[in-house]
Image: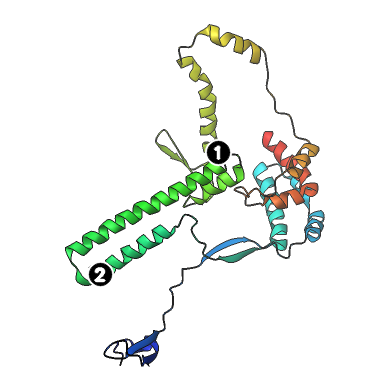
Amino acid sequence: MLITNNPHKYTSVSVFLYDVSDHCVIAGVRGTRIPKVKPCYITKRDTKHFSEQGYRHDLNFADWSRVSIIPDVELAWSYFADLLMSIIDKHAPYKRYRVRGRENPWFSEELANLIHERNYYWAKARKSNTVALWTTFRCLRNKCTALVKKAKSSYYLALTAENLNNLRKFWQTIKSLSQNNSSSLSTCIVSESTTIHDRAEMLNCFNKHFVSSGFLFDKVNTSSSALAPLAVAESPLNSEFNFRPFSVAEVHKALTKLDPKKPAGPDNIGVYFLKLASDFIAEPLTYIYNLTLN
């Protein structure tokens, strides 16, 4: 006989007729499910059925010439970005993917045994509620926490040191340690204890800072003899700086040299799609760049 207050958790009970002791061995099969980890979902573009030919076909028939008749740089960029994104969304729409749980590479057998022992004493301490067991549990808990931190730091330190010459993998490791990978731009800045939300005023504050930073040398007691050769060599008198407009060929060349493996910027336009569209978007982008300089 097997006595339990949860009979629904047992699927079968058997009796083994062996003279192991003064009574027969009773065995029960308990139906237990391992608790599942909550799945993680990410949103990314679905390129499974992406067609470069269809993508370029729609780019060819898009009205890019309208960008060049918009005199405001913000409106011109908005029209360009909306038009390009609508074509990208058509051929590579966003899709929600479920990410399966991955094993932690820093997790070791030693750590697993320690966690098992900690959980064992935690259950015993809760049941008996004695000072000795609670003390043992706290010691194991602290030891477990310290070992997890040590294992993580050792693993990521070795990984970053290994990829110092591989910038892509190096920054992938750094970003994986961040809790918030959002690339959204700040909506406000604080200048002289004043919070500024206006975009133009924010730009003026940055401009004022960089213009004034050049005069910081006046506050430093630096010998004029040490600066004189540098001033003559790199800053001749009556020198003038002017922006040179971009050409369509320069922009097109820069687009074709983009690395498609790089992530998208704050505009969320994938580099892969920009490179494919270089023949069609080089001219409107050139207009936007030169409008920005003007």
CA distance separating discs 2 and 1: 64 Å
Q: Position of residue 138 (x, y in %)?
A: 26, 58
Q: Is residue 11 above or below residue 47?
A: below
Residue at coordinates 43% horizontally, 78% vertically from top-left? 33
Horizontal and vertical percent position of residue 100: 54, 66
Answer with the quarter of the image where residue 144 lies: bottom left
Near mark 1 (Cα within 10 A), the count class, few <14, some 14-19 or many ≥20, is few
Is tag 2's residue or tag 1's residue first in the polypeptide sequence? 2
Quadrant of the image occupied by residue 108: bottom left
Q: Which residue occupies the foreground of this view, 244 or 123?
A: 123
Per the image, the residue denoted by label 2 is 124
Q: Is residue 262 left or right of residue 25?
A: right
Q: How many marks?
A: 2
Instruction: Relative to 114, say whether 10 is above or below.
Output: below
Q: In what quadrant of the picture does the C terminus appear?
A: top right
Q: Quadrant of the N terminus?
A: bottom left
Numbered tag placed on residue 200 in the rendering: 1
Q: Nearer the viewer, residue 5 or 282?
A: 5
